[in-house]
Each structure stands twice: as C-alpha cells, then as structure tokens.
C-alpha cells in the first residue's frame, strides 16, 4: 500500500515538475514572441526611415539639378540687360526652388507692396518711396533691409 502511495507521490511530483517546465517554456516563448515583434517593428521603422531618406536624397538631387540649371540661366544675364520680365521670371523660379527645400526653410524672398499712398512696404518691415516706378524698375532685386530676393507684390492701382 505504501509503495503505491510512493508511486503516486512520485508521479504527482513529476507532473508538477513538468508543469513548471511547461510554464517556464511558455513564458520563454512569450518573451521570444515579444522580442520578435519588437524586432519586426524596429526593422519596419528603419525600413521606413531608409525609404524616407532615399526619397529626400532623390528630391534634393532634383533640386540641385534644377538650381544648377537656373544658375546657368542667371549667369547669362548681364548687368543692365533690359529684359525685366525674363529676369523676374527667373528670380521667381529660383525662389520657388528655394522654398521647396524642406518646408522648414522660410522663403528667401521679401515682398514689397505698394499702399494707397504710393508708399512701398516690405514684409520685413521697411517702408520706401520712389518718385515713380517700382523697386524693380529702379534695379532693386534684393531688399536692402533683409537682403532677401525682392519680390514685387501689390502695386497701387493695379486692381489686385
Ligand atoms: Zn526685406
């Protein structure tokens, strides 16, 4: 009778030990699954990051190409050349490219608008008066106050 009891005790002990090992194995398995998920998320994140950077590099390359083209055009302009429209067109294309350089970079332009008293007000806060014409007709292509490319905004009386 006592032998049977001993056998049963031994069997119960083995079962308890097995259950402990099973629990430990399950716990290890859970940890592994969790680690795998973390790794996957990390890799996915790095992959996204890499893709994003590659895209940025690609965009910057295009921008460099565009700016080089514009610079070549700008180099062809001669001082005093009487092609105001073409020059303005080139300037605005350059500032468009510059604005596009990451949304964090503020546009490198200063807009001069004429008020009803014919006074010109810049976005950087200076006021200026001309006897006639616009800043551009006086050869001002850069704001003397902030140094940015001068863009003519509203002109008094042009109905804008
Ligand atoms: Zn300015």
Image: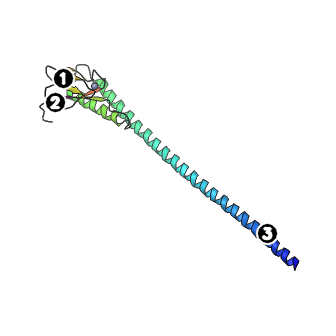
**Within the image, what quadrant is residue 140 found in?**
top left
Residue extending farthest to the bottom is: 1
Looking at the image, residue 9 sits to the left or right of residue 88; the answer is: right
- Pick whichever of labels 1 and 3 is earlier in the sequence: 3
**Within the image, what quadrant is residue 34 found in?**
bottom right
Contact? badges 1 and 3 (CB < 8 Å): no
Contact? badges 1 and 2 (CB < 8 Å): no
Ligand 1 falls in which quarter?
Answer: top left
Camera-side residue: 21 or 72? 21
- Pick whichever of labels 3 and 2 is earlier in the sequence: 3
Residue 116 painted magenta: yes
Q: Which residue is mark 3?
A: 13
- The residue that appears at 46% across and 42% down in the rendered structure is 54
Rendering colour mode:
rainbow
Find the distance from the CA under tag 1 to the CA under tag 3. 100 Å
Q: Position of residue 147 (x, y in %)?
A: 31, 23
- The residue that appears at 33% across and 27% down in the rendered structure is 72
Residue 7 painted magenta: no
**Between marks 1 and 2 in the image, the one whose residue lies nearer the viewer:** 2
Q: Position of residue 98 (x, y in %)?
A: 34, 33
Q: Position of residue 94 (x, y in %)?
A: 31, 31
**Between marks 3 and 2 in the image, the one whose residue lies nearer the viewer:** 3
Contact? badges 3 and 2 (CB < 8 Å): no
**Between marks 1 and 3 in the image, the one whose residue lies nearer the viewer:** 3
Q: Which residue is mark 1?
A: 137
Looking at the image, residue 24 sits to the left or right of residue 35; the answer is: right
**Within the image, what quadrant is residue 62 found in?**
top left
Secondary structure at numbered mark 1: helix
Which residues, given as a range, are shown in magenta? 113-117
- The residue that appears at 16% across and 30% down in the rendered structure is 155
Q: Residue 155 — which label?
A: 2
Mark 3 lies within 8 Å of ligand 1 (Cβ measured): no
């Amino acid at each position: 009778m006592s032998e049977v009891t001993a056998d049963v005790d031994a069997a119960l002990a083995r079962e308890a030990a097995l259950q402990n090992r099973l629990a430990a194995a399950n716990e290890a398995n859970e940890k592994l699954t969790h680690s795998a998920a973390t790794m996957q998320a990390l890799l996915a994140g790095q992959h996204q990051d890499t893709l994003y950077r590659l895209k940025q590099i690609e965009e910057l390359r295009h921008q460099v190409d565009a700016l080089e083209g514009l610079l070549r055009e700008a180099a062809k302009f001669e001082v005093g050349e009487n092609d105001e429209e073409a020059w303005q067109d080139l300037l605005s294309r350059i500032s468009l490219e510059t604005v596009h350089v990451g949304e964090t970079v503020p546009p490198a332009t200063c807009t001069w608008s004429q008020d009803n008293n014919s006074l010109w007000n810049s976005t950087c806060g200076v006021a200026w008066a001309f006897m006639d014409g616009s800043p551009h007709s006086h050869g001002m292509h850069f704001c003397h106050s902030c140094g940015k490319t001068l863009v003519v905004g509203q002109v008094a009386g042009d109905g804008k």
